[in-house]
């Protein structure tokens, strides 16, 4: 059976069989057989092909790995875990964002500690100037989801006030080209901080403020699924969110 996904990706990326073959260090006829006969490459070649085309290996060859193998790879995506966000090394946040080359994403209700950090704001501005897409999702302070979260944390209207405060702190960034702000109205199960294929996930617990909830540091790996779940979730929230006026 033909591998139409691989064929389509080559066309979409404007790449040739010879270019892919050179990258994977195989003969062009081998690549042709991967497409026309649906041959399954060795794992090292699947990794090279996926890297060359900028997609997950599982997209091109969805049946290549068994669930046990996917689970092992996904577990390897966990870089570190902290029981409380307050215990994450302070310089890790800036270091994470400073490594980005394509995408920076922040999904929070207020994320006040990020907006108050002049160093992180400077990184966002520099990265946007370098062509990195910077997207910041804040909770809509007038939404029911934010009101409910304030009640859950026992802070009431202070949650909405923190969001407005964060937006005010972001004022220097709101006119920077390449930095986008949106309000979301979703129930926030996790705060997500993304830099390309790395993610810091601040989980949320009933009755516990975000600063005291656990944080996972994930790094996306080919065929892994854990980091992708949070990256995809960010994208879904972004699509439902609305631009912040004046941003």
Image (cartoon, rainbow, N blue to C red):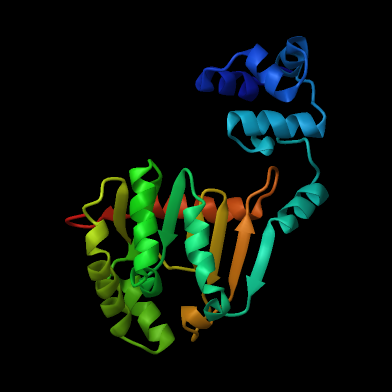
Q: Residue at x 63, y 54 (%)?
A: 219
Q: Position of residue 179 (x, y in %)?
A: 31, 51
Q: Residue at x 35, y 61 (%)?
A: 121
Q: How many marks?
A: 0
Q: Is residue 18 above or below residue 96?
A: above
Of 88 and 222, which appears nearest the observer?
88
In the shown orientation, is residue 16 left or right of residue 204?
right
Image quadrant where one finds the C terminus: bottom left
- Farthest-out residue, left: 246
- Farthest-out residue, bottom: 154
Q: Position of residue 19 (x, y in %)?
A: 64, 16
Q: Position of residue 142 (x, y in %)?
A: 24, 71
In the shown orientation, is residue 181 left or right of residue 94?
left
The answer to whether residue 20 is visible is yes
In the shown orientation, is residue 87 left or right of residue 103?
right
Q: Is residue 66 above or below residue 85?
A: above
Image quadrant where one finds the N terminus: top right
Q: Is residue 233 above or below residue 50?
A: below
Q: Is residue 192 above or below residue 175?
A: below
Q: Residue at x 76, y 36 (%)?
A: 63
Which picture quadrant has residue 47? top right
The answer to whether residue 240 is visible is no
């Amino acid at each position: 059976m033909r591998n139409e996904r691989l064929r389509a990706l080559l066309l979409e990326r404007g790449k040739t069989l010879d270019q892919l073959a050179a990258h994977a260090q195989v003969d062009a006829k081998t690549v042709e057989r991967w497409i026309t006969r649906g041959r399954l490459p060795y794992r090292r070649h699947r990794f090279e092909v996926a890297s060359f085309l900028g997609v997950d290996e599982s997209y091109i060859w969805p049946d290549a790995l068994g669930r046990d193998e996917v689970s092992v790879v996904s577990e390897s995506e966990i870089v570190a875990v902290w029981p409380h966000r307050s215990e994450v090394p302070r310089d890790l946040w800036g270091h994470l964002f400073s490594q980005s080359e394509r995408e920076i994403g922040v999904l929070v209700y207020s994320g006040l500690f990020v907006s108050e950090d002049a160093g992180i704001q400077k990184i966002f501005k520099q990265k946007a100037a370098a062509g990195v897409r910077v997207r910041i999702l804040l909770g809509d302070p007038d939404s029911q989801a934010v009101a409910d979260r304030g009640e859950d944390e026992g802070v009431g209207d202070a949650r909405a006030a923190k969001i407005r405060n964060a937006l005010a702190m972001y004022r220097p960034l709101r006119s920077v080209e390449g930095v986008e702000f949106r309000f979301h109205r979703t129930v926030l199960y996790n705060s997500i901080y993304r830099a390309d294929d790395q993610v810091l996930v601040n989980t949320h617990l009933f009755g516990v403020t975000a600063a005291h909830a656990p944080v996972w540091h994930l790094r996306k790996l080919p065929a892994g699924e854990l980091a992708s779940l949070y990256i995809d979730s960010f994208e879904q929230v972004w699509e439902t969110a609305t631009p912040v006026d004046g941003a």
